[in-house]
Amino acid sequence: MGEFTEPEFADAELIAALAAVGRRIVGEQKPDVAVVLSARHDRLLVRYGDAVLKAHAPGSDPAELALRLRLAADPRLTDSLLAPLPIPGADAPGMLIRVRGRLVSAWPVGTPLHPDDFGTVSETAVDDLPWEQAATLLARLHAVPLWRPVPPARVRRGLERAMAKLSGLSGPAGDDPLVGEILAAYAALPRGEPDGRTQAGRACTSYTPVPGDALVHGDWHLGQLLRLDDRGLRIIDVDDLGAGDPIWDLARPAAWYAAGVLAPAAWARFLGGYTAAGGRAVPPDADPWQVLDAPARALAVAYAANAVADSVLTGTPLDSVARAFVDCCRRMRRL
């Protein structure tokens, strides 16, 4: 896990408790100081020595999270996913522990490819990113045969949270015209199979993959890539990992391309790298937008919803990237 921080959300007592778990993993290293890498309302990352401790979102299901950690640790996936570290004294599967009411896992230290989404990367930097390598990792992940038990991928969780955030605005904030525009774009999204084919309401023990399902990351973007000194890039963050339609792992970069945020050359490198590596999400000899269109629309709405909600709550004007997604939502409604 990498080196970036948002300390305004940090919980000092939880940080200290995570440092204590880190000492159990790596011993008394010097300096024995916990470093906050990232702190948000739904998760906390703390580095201690050569281990990164992750406090997962409150309310995370321990059984499903344990299954996801087992998947990440499986040798069949270690060339695409970052494998968790064992925690001495942790309950089965030995990689998950409860600390101050939060489920905690441990991970190797690495360097994030980028600490956020594509949207914060300059156009020059986009050209320099390893698009083909990133796409190859996804293709490898999607090629691994499913085995049970496996939880359903939570491919629409980000969209659902973004829309709850936007629709929950009250008072003058909720009356902002942009809020109504994005809610209307959401209402116009295609329904049915684009919802993810993951039977997300069912228990993971009863989940049965349908034809076409693959192992899906569920929340893939450049911020989910970590560079390890000895092994190259790996995909991180297994909180949404599971069985589902692999097209959703391509949906976010497709949305950025559709909104004009991602340059055509970068998108072509990514999609070309994915298909060249045998990626199964898009048809090899047909228009990829036959399957990309609906998920890309959903992710464009999610980005716009988060941006508009933050803008009206803080009074901060939308930046150029956010405006591009708002304009994309307007075009979708006209179509």
Image (cartoon, rainbow, N blue to C red):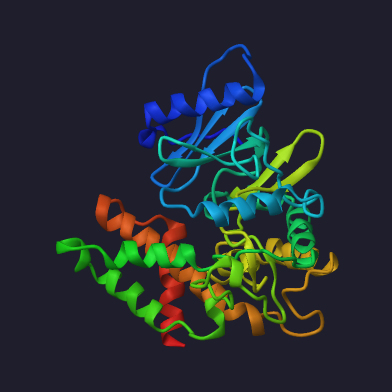
Quadrant hosting residue 309: bottom left
Quadrant hosting residue 290: bottom right
- In the image, what residue occupies the spot 45% across and 24% down? 16
Measured from the top left, where is residue 138 in percent x and y? 73, 60
Measured from the top left, where is residue 81 in percent x and y? 72, 50
- In the image, what residue occupies the spot 31% across and 64% down? 166
Q: Nearer the viewer, residue 208 or 113?
A: 208
- In the image, what residue occupies the spot 65% across and 74% down? 245
Residue lying at the far top of the rendered structure: 30
**Residue 262 position (above or below residue 17):** below
What is the count of numbered marks? Answer: 0
Left or right: 76 in relation to 250: right
Q: Can residue 222 be seen in this view?
A: no
Q: Which of 315 and 44 is in front in this view?
A: 44
**Residue 46 position (above or below residue 244):** above
Left or right: 111 in relation to 165: right
Q: Nearer the viewer, residue 332 or 203?
A: 203
Q: Is residue 172 visible?
A: yes
- Image quadrant for the N terminus? top right
- In the image, what residue occupies the spot 37% across and 32% down? 11
Measured from the top left, where is residue 285 in percent x and y? 81, 83
